[in-house]
Image (cartoon, rainbow, N blue to C red):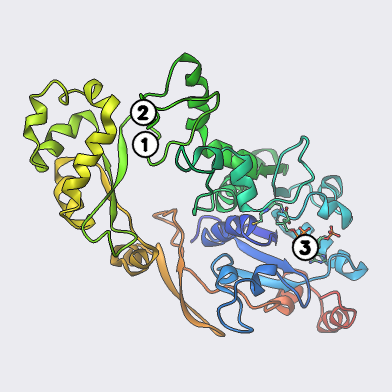
Amino acid sequence: MKALEGVRILDMTHVQSGPTCTQLLAWFGADVIKVERPGVGDATRGQLRDIPDVDSLYFTMLNHNKRSITLNTKSDKGKEIFSKLIETCDVLAENFAPGALDRMGFSWERIQEINPRIVYASVKGFGPGPYADCKVYENVAQCTGGSASTTGFDDGPPLVTGAQIGDSGTGLNLALGIVTALFQREKTGRGQRVTCAMQDGVLNLCRVKLRDQQRLKHGPLKEYPQYPNGEFGDATPRSGNASGGGQPGWIVKCKGWENDDNAYTYVITQAASFPALAKAMGREEWLEDPEWSTPEARLPKLDQVFDEIEKWTMTKTKFEVMDILNPLNVPCGPILSMKELAEEPALRDTGTVVEVDHPDRGKYLTVGNPIKLSDSPAAVERSPLLGEHTDEIMRDVLGYSAEEIAAAKESGAV
Ligand SMILES: CC(C)(COP(=O)(O)OP(=O)(O)OC[C@H]1O[C@@H](n2cnc3c(N)ncnc32)[C@H](O)[C@@H]1OP(=O)(O)O)[C@@H](O)C(=O)NCCC(=O)NCCS
């Protein structure tokens, strides 16, 4: 059995933030019914296509284990079918532009009238406030949530990160909100509204930077590369590759960096393992020299410490550095490329990287469920074709006859 077996999700999500949430719930066993506009579907089906007329990887990698029904929720017949879906589902999830569901005639009040047990979960770019009506994509959330202003190097512009913290990050929040609301419903019998703003989600992930904003009042941020020679302004600065915690760390070059963009490693020089690191590098003399032997002595010249570490790492591959430092309890992490991650056998073994077969595109790789439950296995099934399950859902979930289904198709509602 799967953890969420028996839970039915009315999935009105599109693009990335919402679909990542409902995909997770599907992996936990929920029956996820994805509602898509007839003839069009989720816009990502056609975005960044690598094979003509075939659902894009953008879509297939965000919509596994779901069923697809096409439904025009703006037509009269479509509204009737949509109301029946609300009646029968436990959760309605959506991430349309603000107000889209209300404009279709389905306000939270109306949805509760139809099904008081339903959990109505939404992702929006912003919470209530001056920007509540804005449409938002990933990088807008990164920029308005504190990530971009604190990412990059001090002498460069703000940077967005490759990790989709606004979209997939907020999808995680929404999934937690949904299962928590379902848990409460088991006791109260009532559904509730779950709302997650992407700005809030990004700021939550940038918590340590708001910590640093407040620390600034009491003096320079000593673990930042600006200390002691650079300038601090009145806002948390960009800290390059410095660690967000109290342990100094940096990215250094490894053997082969001249020809390989990813021949680098992250090395952390925490006090407890510094002696082992110094010995591994052949710099035992540091341990006796008051100029280098204590964290306080090293702090103002961390750039020199990492320059010396780099001279050593440049003589080893990033994997050799890992092999040497890990047994010494020196935390380090090779910069792994997407190619290396795709080929990593351990990630295949755990189901984190999965090969899936698709009738139109053939085999492709995806990221499986990153959350492992020992009693709820998550097999990854291919994403649905547009409207692949329309008839089956109309018949088995909603109880429509073959004639009624044919009439709904005739009217263009499905
Ligand atoms: C992502 C986003 C910017 C995309 O904007 P968009 O492509 O213009 O799409 P919208 O959400 O505005 O939806 C377009 C329209 O399609 C309509 N539509 C969607 N599914 C439909 C269906 N099955 N039947 C009929 N109409 C449908 C919507 O009701 C909306 O109509 P309206 O403008 O008359 O209200 C926007 O949805 C958004 O800001 N979402 C919230 C934040 C978010 O999740 N962003 C991250 C995305 S990864």
Amino acid beneath label 1 = Ser
Task: Give residue 332's quadrant in the image.
Answer: top left
Task: Give residue 408's quadrant in the image.
Answer: bottom right
Q: Residues within 10 Å of mark 2 (few under 14, many from 20)?
A: many
User: Residue 39's spot in the image, x, y percent?
Assistant: 77, 78
Residue 183 visible at all: no
Mark closest to the chain's N terminus, 3 or 2: 3
Front residue of 15 and 237: 237
Could you tell me which secondary element the residue under label 1 belongs to?
A: loop
Numbered circle sitting on residue 214: none
Question: Which quadrant holds the C terminus?
Answer: bottom right
Asked if labels 2 and 1 touch by Cβ distance under 8 angstroms, the answer is yes
Mark closest to the chain's N terminus, 1 or 2: 2
In the image, is residue 61 above or below residue 362?
above
Identity of the residue drawn at 55% across and 85% down: 359
Residue receiving disc 2: 223
Residue receiving disc 3: 85
Residue receiving disc 1: 243
Amino acid beneath label 2 = Glu
Q: Residues within 10 Å of mark 1 (few under 14, many from 20)?
A: some
Front residue of 184 and 56: 56
User: Residue 129's spot in the image, x, y percent?
Assistant: 77, 34
| 19 lies left or right of 243 | right
